[in-house]
Image (cartoon, rainbow, N blue to C red):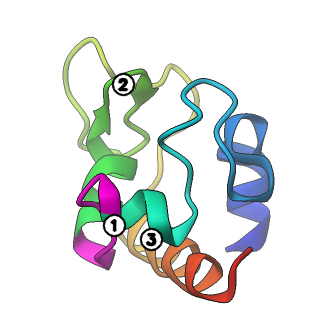
Amino acid sequence: TEMVFENKCAGCHVAGGNIQAPGKTLKLDDLEKNDVASIQSIAAVISEGKDRMPGFGAKCEGANCTFAERLTDDQVRDLAEYVANKAKQGW
């Protein structure tokens, strides 16, 4: 899962940050402030995208989906758990 994060997420979210939107990092305080601290909420954002972040889920539809290779539901869930755990550890 760490490799998936490095390949799909770290370009914008290096060390849990956010180079596109500084107030929307993957740090626990920002996840809670933006009401996306649960594994289910994180998975939904990974899968469908939100604001400037594209969706990476295999079932993502619409203009806000990545053109890159998509993630399976299991990969999305594992990645959401990884992000939640790293956030709790302070990255």
**Disc 3 and disc 2 in contact, CB within 8 angstroms:** no
Point out the stretch of residues depicted in magenta: 33-40
Relative to 22, does residue 62 appear above or below in the rendering?
Answer: above
Measuring from the top left, give residue 65's x and y in whole percent: 36, 24
Residue 35 image point, x, y percent: 23, 60
Residue depicted at 64% across the width and 39% down the height: 18
| Residues at marks 3 and 2, CA–CA distance in whole angstroms | 17 Å
Foreground residue among 41 and 4: 41
Residue drawn at 39 percent across, 74 percent down: 77
Where 52 falls versus 2 (above or below)? above
Which image quarter is the C terminus in?
Answer: bottom right
Ranked by sequence position, the earlier of labels 1 and 2 is 1
At 47% from the left and 52% from the top, the residue drawn is 71
Q: Nearer the viewer, mark 3 or mark 1?
A: 1
Name which residue type carries label 3. Answer: Ala
Which residue is labeled 1 in the image? 32
Q: Distance between the residues labelled 3 and 1?
A: 14 Å
Q: Measuring 79% from the left and 64% from the top, which residue is drawn there?
A: 3
Q: State the count of labels.
A: 3
Queried whether the magenta region covers residue 39, the answer comes back as yes
> At numbered mark 2, what does the secondary structure look like: helix, strand or loop?
loop
46 lies left or right of 88: left
Q: Is residue 84 magenta?
A: no
- Which quadrant is the N terminus positioned in? bottom right
Q: Mark 3 points at which residue?
A: 80
